[in-house]
Image (cartoon, rainbow, N blue to C red):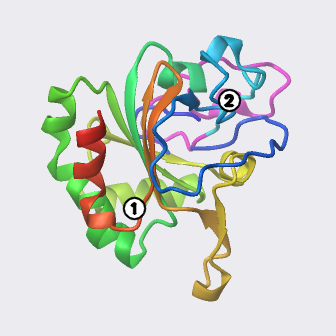
Amino acid sequence: MHASKGAPLGKIQTQSLPIELPQSNHFPKSFCVLCFDNRCSSLTRCRYFAFRPLVFPNHATNHHQHMNDADSNLAKDNAVSMTDLFQNKKVAVFGVPAPFTGTCTTAHYPPYQRLQNEFKAKGFDAVVCYSVADPYAHYNWGLAMGNDFDSIAFLADADGEWARSNDLERDYTGASLGHRSARFSMVVEDGIVKAFNLVEDAEKDAEVLLQQA
């Protein structure tokens, strides 16, 4: 994933990985945030560690990191690598299907905003709001929600590659949203997912994740 200050998520260069996740909504075992494999012990050992940075609109900062000359127009975009986001950090990530939609706006995001200090008290270095969406819509949703982007990073997975690679893509065509991410949340420590939830009660998700920290 990618994060820049005040920016939403782009894409990770990974191959499609068949992942069989447990049927339970809760995942007690640790697994890698890149490949969702519980045998992978760290970001640097992950077979998907080599990925291109995520690209975001140039709206908040002018710096970028981990760029390759071969990557098109990255010099004009903000990007932070998965390593920058997760390595040596404790991060709370919650995934929403789409910005500006009802449940995401009224039930899922507000508790995370309200409980920012509680997450900090639990030792979290960052809270990330992830969505399969274009970064412009996701960023402006954050603005509309009164987010200052220092408290919660809004990250947009523009082509849904991370969600698709980890079997988290869902078809919301019936709701005119196309293919998006499942609603989920996770605790990530140094690139390892320590707790994972497929969220059914969006309003209680932030409290549940705090209890799992």
* Magenta extent: 56-80
CA gap, disc 1 to disc 2? 23 Å
Residue 78 belongs to the span the image colors magenta: yes
Residue type, mark 1 in image: Trp
Checking the image for residue 53, the label placed there is 2
- Spot occupied by residue 200 in the image (x, y as percentages of width and height): 40, 67
Q: Quadrant of residue 186?
A: top left
In the image, residue 171 sits, relative to residue 20, either above or below, namely below
- Spot occupied by residue 182 in the image (x, y as percentages of width and height): 55, 62
Q: Which residue carries the number 1 mark?
A: 141
Say whether residue 63 is left or right of residue 17: left
Tell me the chief SS of the magenta region. loop
Frontmost residue, 196 versus 158? 196
Image point (69%, 46%), residue name: 166
Q: Is residue 57 visible?
A: yes
Label 1 secondary element: helix
Structural crowding at the residue carrying mark 1, measured as other residues with C-alpha within 10 Å and reported as few (<14), some (14–19) or many (≥20): some
Total marks shown come to: 2
* Pointers 1 and 2 in contact (C-beta within 8 Å): no
Label 2 secondary element: loop
Image point (16%, 46%), residue name: 115
- Spot occupied by residue 59 in the image (x, y as percentages of width and height): 47, 42
Tell which residue pokes out farthest to the bottom in this image.
174
Image point (47%, 56%), residue name: 25
Q: Is residue 81 visible?
A: no
- Spot occupied by residue 63 in the image (x, y as percentages of width and height): 52, 22
Which of the two discs, 1 and 2, labels the residue nearer the N terminus?
A: 2
In the image, residue 19 sits, relative to residue 191, either above or below, namely below
